[in-house]
Image (spheres, helix red, strand yellow):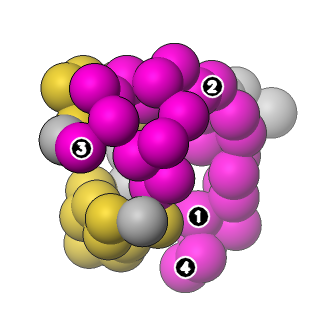
Amino acid sequence: MEEYFYNCPFCFSHVSILVDLSIPNQQYIEDCERCCNPIEFSISSDGELLTNVEIQGLDQ
């Protein structure tokens, strides 16, 4: 697991998620821990390092 820090696209808070690097391609929705708005994460890894992280706020 690796901690990844990002800025929320809604409230701009600096928050983090834990990423399981053993899963090469992941896509999921998680609420911001500060403002509770939904964020879509698209994450790629090579098994040891993060290779790509895309973060997009979802309209409600």
Q: CA distance from mark 4 to mark 3?
A: 29 Å
User: Which residue is labeled 4 in the image?
Assistant: 34
Q: Residue furthest right?
A: 60
Check disc 3 and report its element: helix, strand or loop: loop
Q: CA distance from mark 4 to mark 1?
A: 5 Å
User: Measuring 71% from the left and 39% from the top, which residue is drawn there?
Assistant: 29
The kind of residue tagged 3 is Glu
User: Which residue is labeled 3 in the image?
Assistant: 48
Estimate how packed mark 1 is, as few (under 14), some (14 to 19) or many (20 or more) residues with alpha carbons within 10 Å: many
Pointer 2 or 1: first along the chain: 2
Q: Quadrant of residue 47?
A: top left
Pointer 4 or 2: first along the chain: 2
User: Measuring 70% from the left and 67% from the top, which residue is drawn there?
Assistant: 36
The kind of residue tagged 2 is Gln
The kind of residue tagged 4 is Arg
The reply to whether the C-beta atoms of the residues labelled 4 and 1 are less than 8 Å apart is yes
Stretch of the chain drawn in magenta? 19-48
Residue in the foreground of this view, choosing between 27 and 11: 27
Pointer 4 or 3: first along the chain: 4
Q: Is residue 40 magenta?
A: yes
Q: Nearer the viewer, mark 4 or mark 2?
A: 2
Check disc 2 and report its element: helix, strand or loop: strand
The kind of residue tagged 1 is Cys
Q: CA distance from mark 4 to mark 2?
A: 21 Å
User: Which residue is labeled 1 in the image?
Assistant: 32
Q: Nearer the viewer, mark 4 or mark 3?
A: 3
Check disc 1 and report its element: helix, strand or loop: loop
Residue 24 is left or right of residue 28, and the answer is left
